[in-house]
Image: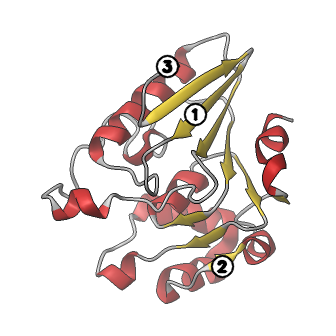
């Protein structure tokens, strides 16, 4: 097991990756670099077949970029390390499935992280939204293309232009998530 802000647990051929940055599991550059190293090791380990990424606690999956780090001078276009933001978006050669187990808010860059995964399972209390436009920021083009492929252009426009927050039922209806489960069943469902 590694130290916070990322905890890993190996269960046979499954690697569980937990984002553990109190209060909200936001990702700064240092955390992103650690995630990139973890997912690179996952990619390169022939004994691992699947990874599950989740957020610690039941309050947040990931709100995306750490705005406190930004206020402290961290650049939005800074070096996020291997794999780009969250370690997955730009990681080349990853030919193993990654499952997002989403509990709580999944906002902005959290949606980018989830969409970079192959499957997304969430709890009924999970919420989703892409809010950079509210902050005067532009959603990364590569993430936007992934989103269009996943949910289609209409749903992508609704997510990007409105900044509206969707509940788990709305996310399931638009195809953003593959399954909705009860809170205690999130990791068992992802493992299954």
- Mark 3: secondary structure: helix
Q: Is residue 147 above or below residue 13?
A: below
| Residue position marked by numbered label 1 in the rendering | 17
The percent position of residue 110, horizontal first and vertical second, equals 51, 58
Q: Earlier in the sequence, mark 3 or mark 2?
A: 3
Seen at 42% across and 33% down, the residue is 4
| The quadrant where residue 139 appears | bottom left
Q: Earlier in the sequence, mark 3 or mark 1?
A: 1
Seen at 73% across and 68% down, the residue is 125
Mark 3, residues whose alpha carbon is within 10 Å: few (<14), some, or many (≥20)?
A: few
The percent position of residue 132, horizontal first and vertical second, equals 38, 75
Seen at 56% across and 58% down, the residue is 60
- Mark 2: secondary structure: strand
Question: In the image, which disc is placed on residue 166?
Answer: 2
Q: Are marks 3 and 2 in contact (CB under 8 Å)?
A: no
| Residue position marked by numbered label 3 in the rendering | 41
Q: Is residue 16 above or below residue 109?
A: above
Mark 1, residues whose alpha carbon is within 10 Å: few (<14), some, or many (≥20)?
A: many
Q: Is residue 91 left or right of residue 28?
A: right
Q: Earlier in the sequence, mark 2 or mark 1?
A: 1
Q: Quadrant of the C terminus?
A: top right
Q: CA distance from mark 3 to mark 2?
A: 34 Å
The percent position of residue 180, horizontal first and vertical second, equals 82, 61
The percent position of residue 70, horizontal first and vertical second, equals 21, 61
| The quadrant where residue 76 appears | bottom left
Q: Nearer the viewer, mark 3 or mark 2?
A: 2
Q: Is residue 34 left or right of residue 10?
A: left
Q: CA distance from mark 2 to mark 1?
A: 25 Å
């Amino acid at each position: 097991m590694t130290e916070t802000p990322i905890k890993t647990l190996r269960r046979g051929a499954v690697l569980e990756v937990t984002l553990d940055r109190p209060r909200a599991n936001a990702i700064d550059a240092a955390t992103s670099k650690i995630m990139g190293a973890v997912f690179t090791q996952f990619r390169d380990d022939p004994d691992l077949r699947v990874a599950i990424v989740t957020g610690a606690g039941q309050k947040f999956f990931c709100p995306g970029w750490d705005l406190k780090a930004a206020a402290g001078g961290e650049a939005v276009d800074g070096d996020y390390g291997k794999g780009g933001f969250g370690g997955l978006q730009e990681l080349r050669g990853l030919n193993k499935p990654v499952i997002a187990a989403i509990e709580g808010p999944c906002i902005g860059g959290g949606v980018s992280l989830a969409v970079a995964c192959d499957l997304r399972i969430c709890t009924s209390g999970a919420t989703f939204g892409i809010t950079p436009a509210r902050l005067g920021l532009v959603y990364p083009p590569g993430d936007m293309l992934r989103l269009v492929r996943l949910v289609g252009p209409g749903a992508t426009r609704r997510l990007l232009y409105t900044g509206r927050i969707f509940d788990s039922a709305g996310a399931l209806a638009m195809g953003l998530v593959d399954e909705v489960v009860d809170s205690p069943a999130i990791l068992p469902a992802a493992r299954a």
